[in-house]
Image (cartoon, rainbow, N blue to C red):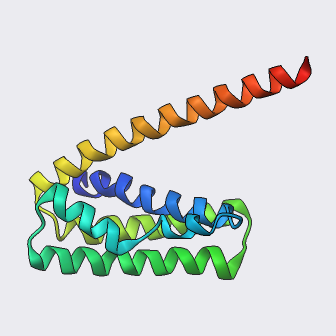
Amino acid sequence: MRLVICNWGLVLTLVLGAVSAFADDRNPEAKHRLNPERHTQYLTEKLALDTQQQEQVRAILEGSHARVESILENHRPTRDNVRTELKAVRKDTDIQLASVLTLEQMEKMQALRKVHREHRRERAVKRRHHTENTHDEAEY
């Protein structure tokens, strides 16, 4: 169970990347944020994946990416339905990754995810603060 929870953030990162690419159709670069090949390279560097793990992780991430793309492009369901479907993809991906990575690698990935999550929160606060200041200035 712990291994499944450890991978939750990795998949959430994938899913959020897909959602942000979907939400920002005006930015052609946004669709390249969710890149299984780049993500596999990143994990290889940070977690010291061996060749077999690289192939397995790449296949898992490619499969997850394809499922997320399908959900976002083909269904155009309500927000709640999207969330439910993406959670199912996340759960499946977690289970698959837990079977490939060692406990040490999972712990490293969890630490990386924590740093990434904190960085995302800081950026969100800065964006909110910037938006509030922009609105305040516009009122004068």
Residue 122 lies left or right of residue 20; in this view the side is left
Number of marks present in the image shown = 0
Between 12 and 126, the one lying in front of the other is 126
The residue drawn where x is 11% and y is 79% is 52
Q: Is residue 39 left or right of residue 108?
A: right
Q: Position of residue 71 (x, y in %)?
A: 60, 76
| 34 shown above or below 138 | below
Q: Residue furthest right?
A: 140
Instruction: Please report the residue visible at 17 percent of the width from the left and 60 percent of the height from the top.
Output: 45
Q: Which quadrant of the figure has residue 8?
A: bottom left
The residue closer to the viewer here, 61 or 44, is 44
Question: Image quarter for residue 7?
Answer: bottom left
Query: Looking at the picture, how far across and down is residue 18, in whole percent?
Result: 54, 65
Determine whether, in the image, residue 129 is placed left or right of residue 118.
right
Residue drawn 56% across and 36% down? 124
The answer to whether 87 is drawn above or below residue 118 in the figure is below
Q: Residue 104 location in percent, x, y?
A: 10, 52
Q: Quadrant of the N terminus?
A: bottom left
Q: Residue at x 33, y 74 (%)?
A: 37
Provide residue 4's location: percent of width, then percent of height. Answer: 29, 58
State whether residue 87 is above or below residue 131.
below
Q: Residue furthest top?
A: 140
Name the foreground residue: 92 vs 17: 17
For the C terminus, which image quadrant?
A: top right
Above or below for 94 versus 73: above
